[in-house]
Image (cartoon, helix red, strand yellow):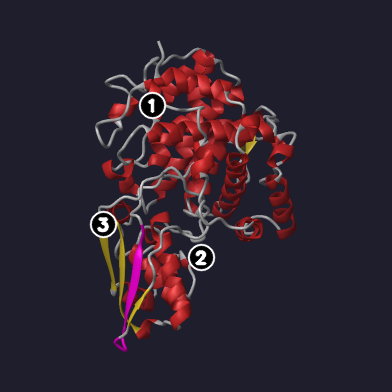
Amino acid sequence: MDSITLKAAQFVTGFDADRAPEAARHAARIGFVDCIGCMLAGAAEPAVALASVIATPMPGSNDAAPAVDGRSYGAGDAALVNGVAGHVLDFDDVALAGHPSTVLVPAILALGHERHATGAQALAAWLAGYELWAHLSEIEPGHLHDRGFHPTAVMGTLACAAASARLLGLDVGQTRHALAIAASLAAGLVANFGSMTKSLHAGRTAQSGIHAARLASAGYTGSADVFEHRTGFLRAFSPSGAPDLDPAGFRIGEVSLAERFGVNVKRYPTCYATHRALDAMLDLVGEHDLTPEKIAAIHVHTGATQKLMLRNSRPQTGLAAKFSMEFAMAGAVVQRRLGLDELTDGFVQRADVQALLERVEVTASEDKAGGDLPNAPFDLVWVDATDGRVLRHEPVEHARGSWQLPLERAEIRAKFLDCASRKLPQPRAAQLFDTLWALENIGDLREIALI
């Protein structure tokens, strides 16, 4: 009998990436480029070194996968370390209400390194994982964030299991078991946003996907109806309580959601819920030459789910500030930009930043735009100037760098070099970008040198 779980497993094993739309394939390329750049930028963060204490290095092993901390590990542990590095700066791409590449890429790189996978196989694994995540999300009308679940950690575990099953060459039955195992490994809470644990979500998700597929390959079993059962994944994690469990409504393989939703490349290393407002604020700063002393108040009207994620109204650390609309607005005015150099404890604690964030008011609407992100239809930003003027920006529907307002290749390259050159010499970083941009031409993932 047809079921959602069976259809998912059949899609993962039978998916032909060569027939995928070019836009979907381009999304995968961008995902690899952007994630690996963020991994290299995050390599020196304390969370990476701390996470590595639960990973076991494998020096001298030809099959050990490299991690950005300079060590080589078994595939699961390499995915753990690289996943933490890729997500710790919160600069990685966004889609499907989460961060697909920051879990998929570490898992694919690690397992693919071990198995001498090609770039074309890596691209196919990314797309298989993305499409599974996207289509499962499509049959749930609610938003996981509203229940306190981090979609990257919950849906990402299934996606990574799918990608890993592809790389391991599992059959339909084994893939079905891998997805069932992954469904019981999925976990991650929004309450941990603004702490090191958010990046641990990414690392453990990538690792769990590999573990689920490997267990299934060895003969470990899970329930054949894990998605649709009354006590299964879709009901247990359902924010609405009413997921569509009719297999006919699960249209995986019929339409490409990677083509529709793609990936949104971040221009700021903060929660994506701040990005539309940041675009508006920086426009106002440039247009009116705004400085803190010219501002009486800053007003932001955003979405309720966005505001829920932005839980830190008075942050004192760089990690906490990533989830603060107040900091985003204040930092953008004080520095006239917001990049990696501003997301430090020292900058966040500056007196001028702290004084200005006290003058930021954030309100929220329950309206939802639809699509793959739990956003309001638009964000509004306006400033009460000390001279009595009210300076308003037009509503912002899409952030710059989004799938709807994409960055050019040169802009993506500039971000990659800014990130990667924090770990690698500039010439090596430039060469790595060119290699990754031609992902399908890579004959063996071992050609990708992270250390």
Per the model, the C-alpha gap separating discs 2 and 3 is 28 Å
User: Mark 1 or mark 3, which is nearer the start of the sequence?
Assistant: 1
* Label 2: element kind: loop
Numbered label attached to residue 365: 3
The residue singled out by tag 1 in the image is 249
Task: Name the residue nearer the viewer: 100 or 389.
Answer: 389
Residue furthest to the top = 1
- Residue 209, image x, y percentages: 49, 30
Whether residue 52 can be seen here: no
Numbered label attached to residue 339: 2
- Residue 379, image x, y percentages: 35, 62
Residue drawn at x 46%, y 23% is 8
- Residue 95, image x, y percentages: 46, 45
The amino acid marked with disc number 1 is Gly
Q: Is residue 271 above or below residue 189?
A: below
Check if residue 426 falls in the magenta segment. Answer: no
User: Mark 3 or mark 2, which is nearer the start of the sequence?
Assistant: 2
Per the model, the C-alpha gap separating discs 3 and 1 is 30 Å
Q: Are marks 2 and 3 in contact (CB under 8 Å)?
A: no
Residue drawn at x 32%, y 84% is 389
Task: Name the residue nearer the viewer: 339 or 14.
Answer: 14
Task: Name the residue nearer the viewer: 197 or 242.
Answer: 242
* Label 3: element kind: strand
The amino acid marked with disc number 2 is Gly
Residue drawn at x 39%, y 35% is 137
Q: Exactly how many numbered labels are in the figure?
A: 3
What is the span of residues highlighted in magenta in the rendered image? 378-388
Per the model, the C-alpha gap separating discs 1 and 2 is 42 Å
Residue drawn at x 27%, y 21% is 231
